[in-house]
Image (spheres, helix red, strand yellow):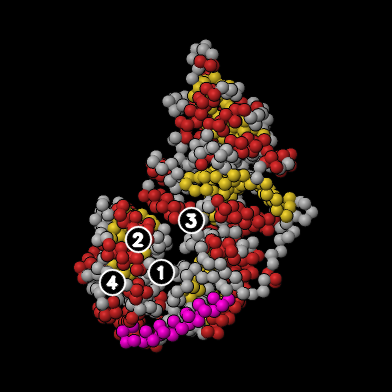
Amino acid sequence: MATQLVNMLNQVIEYGKAHDLCQFHTEDETLNGRTITIDGNEMINFGSCSVLGMEYRDELKQGVIDAVTRYGTQFSSSRTYVGIGMYEELESLLNEIFEKPVLVSATTTLGHLSAIPTLVDDNDAVILDIQVHSSIQMTTEILKARGVTVTLIRHNDMEGLERKIMDLKAKHDKVWYFADGVYSMYGDYAPLDELEQLLDKYKQFNLYIDDAHGMTWAGKKGVGLVRSKMKHHERMVLAVSLNKTFGAAGGCLVFPDQASRDLVRNCGGTMIFSGPIQPPMLGAAIASARMHLNGQVEAMQEELLDLLRYTSDRIRDLGLPLIQDSDSPLFFIPVGKHRVTYDILGDMLKAGYFMNPATFPATSMKRTGMRFLVNLALTKADIDAMLDELVVAYTKHVIESGSSFAKVAKTFRIDAFEPRIPMHKLQRDTAELQIEIKRSINEMDATDWDTTFAGKGNFNASTLKMVEEVFSGEDNAPENQWDFFYFTARDAEGKVVLKTFFTSALVKEDMFHSGAVSAKVEARRADDPYYMTTKSIMLGSLITKGEHLFLDRNHPQWKNALQMLIDRMQETVEEVGAGQLLLREFMGEQDAELQDAFYGLGLVRHELPNVCTIQEMSWKDEAEYMSRLGSRYRYDVRREIIKHRDKFVMTTVKPETDEEIRACYKLYESVFERSFEINVFKLPFAFFKAMCQSEEFEIIRLYLKDGNRPVEELDMVAVMFSHVSDKLYSAMIVGMDYRVLRSHEVYKQVLYRTVWQAWYHKCESLDLAFTAEAVKKKVGARPVKATAYLQVMDHFNQAVLASLQKAS
């Protein structure tokens, strides 16, 4: 799963790079805090985290010059042996600012790496806010490796936090909560009043809070946002940054007592083994600390506050939304769709305003937005000009994307808003495409459907009718109540540009995680069968396979059609409260243009297990078939399959009685209970009964021979349910008796028989589905890359599953 997350992040960054939206470099010979030059274009900089511009102050520059003149560019020694004397001077000044014991680290991240593993004991428990900074989440991996209990709560969920405290305090010595003071994407604050109440209420509760984004611009003596709103509790550890607004380099840990400070100083890994802050930046930090203490910073805070109030007023006047109306210099304008945020960013960059998109993985793919910071180098005229451009770009792209201001408000759970610019100039030009949505295959032209999807998968019209009948009953279990949507987009002349179907169904959120993770989750489902499940809006259905999307890529409006499909699927997500949107399957290598279109619509690529297929089945007999296998596989087939062939009796006569079908179902259950690679709900018996009654399905049953006893008296040891249509043979569901699985190579035998049944029906290709790739290769199958495109609406459970993956 970790690799998958890396791949998803890489896709997002590569998309940004390809569209000139990220990983820039400045080209200025000098910097002034107000503008930067990128690709020859001077831009007003709304992206700086140093909101007071301390790095440009003469005091800090002189501090650097004095330090480098006196001490050189570096002091190369571990502080365990000897530290340069400037450290003592800096920590003394910081003690005056915080009025608590402090410890300076080379960076805030390295401070976390020293403090957290040292302060948290093996019998403690840790609760993470889902949005706590990545540097803290990274550090907790060390705790997990030691066996420390680490769990998550939703962002700023104080009721959830208290429940966790109550659950954990009986079994653990201390319960820690790790949070940020100011969260770096949305700019919202931790609920500090409530945290203080919990600290007073529960004596085992401890708080570790990172105020890197709150330092200097808030509080008396620039003590930071957290300490400006609450006292330093006796069970609180505070981490701040000496970068960002402080204007220098390094991090600082603030402790409730000297003993905790000394413990981390003596035992923290990065205090022992990492290099120090070097003299020039220690000089800058000392100069900055003096400005914090002599009142200069507080005067600058007042200037900044005036700009922040002005900015907030202008945003309200223009009718733009805010995720939170506060006195923070970090502003987040909610957008929603990933592509829309990037489109707005592109317009703002062209207009000469540099700012940051807030996107995955810092936010979910559907809760992205524009992020900018106001700093003292900017003027009110700069702010006016930027916001005037932003309201135009915002309105234009939200409307043209097919979204709406109401949808944005609903997505972010904020009040309704209406940007104030002329709306008639910004209407979406997609009237040429006509959308048709039907709720049953019975409302579609069956012949047209089957012609469109011939050879694409196991979802012809008659099969879909059967699937609808099984999975649409109101009396079904929740996991077997599916809704069906048949979507067609036509141009003005009636030509089909896009045709597909999608379903709404309950899925297990660990469906694509490792078997080890699913095994852990299934242990919880013994008591709560719907633990970590969510509605999924997916292309196709849980039981169909193949290329579910017909898209005429030669049509000039194919991207509009695709956007309309995703819009309708996202509307369904909202209607049913689904947790994910999934487009599947796309076979083979995906071309860059289609991937780019999906990324722009807020979906990231998710690699599925390979699909094993035989694409060419024109051999005339077994000898020619065997000749097509490699020598190694020929040997395996003879030794492991043909050797045992005479031990079996095969029939393709369909089971008719409930007893016969139950026997098949029992073998399926035996496989299901052992299979976690793609973790799904168990299919209902009614589906097997329907397959046995359908002309579209073939059922292979294998029995072990026993003398001359007739088939009805023999033990059935394997069954394969397959769909046959349009010269495509799709092996769907296997069942086996595990008591003879290895002794008689039962699985290999039923696969081999499946190959020959596909050949017997003169099919041109055979789909052997996912998993067991090594075995399927032996019978001539070859793996084909399968890709899905995914949008997760709520990353909380995925973060929980990822933590289970790392612990496996």
* Image height of 678 relative to 281, above or below: above
Query: Mark 3 sits on what residue?
Result: 794
* Magenta-drawn segment: 292-318
Q: Is residue 315 magenta?
A: yes
Asked whether 453 or 401 is in front, the reply is 401
Q: Residue at x 58, y 50 (%)?
A: 583
Q: Are marks 1 and 4 in contact (CB under 8 Å)?
A: no
Please report whichever mark, 4 or 2, sits nearer to the chain's N-terminal start: 2
Residue 139, numbered circle: 2
Secondary structure at numbered mark 2 = helix
Give the CA separation, mark 1 to mark 2: 22 Å
Q: Amino acid at mark 3?
A: Asp
User: What residue sits right under mark 1 in the picture?
Assistant: 189
Q: Is residue 69 magenta?
A: no
- Residue at the spot of label 4: 232
**Foreground of the two, 389 or 139:** 389
Determine the CA span between mark 3 and mark 4: 33 Å
The total number of labels drawn is: 4
Callout 4–callout 2 Cβ contact below 8 Å: no
Nearer-N-terminus badge (1/2): 2
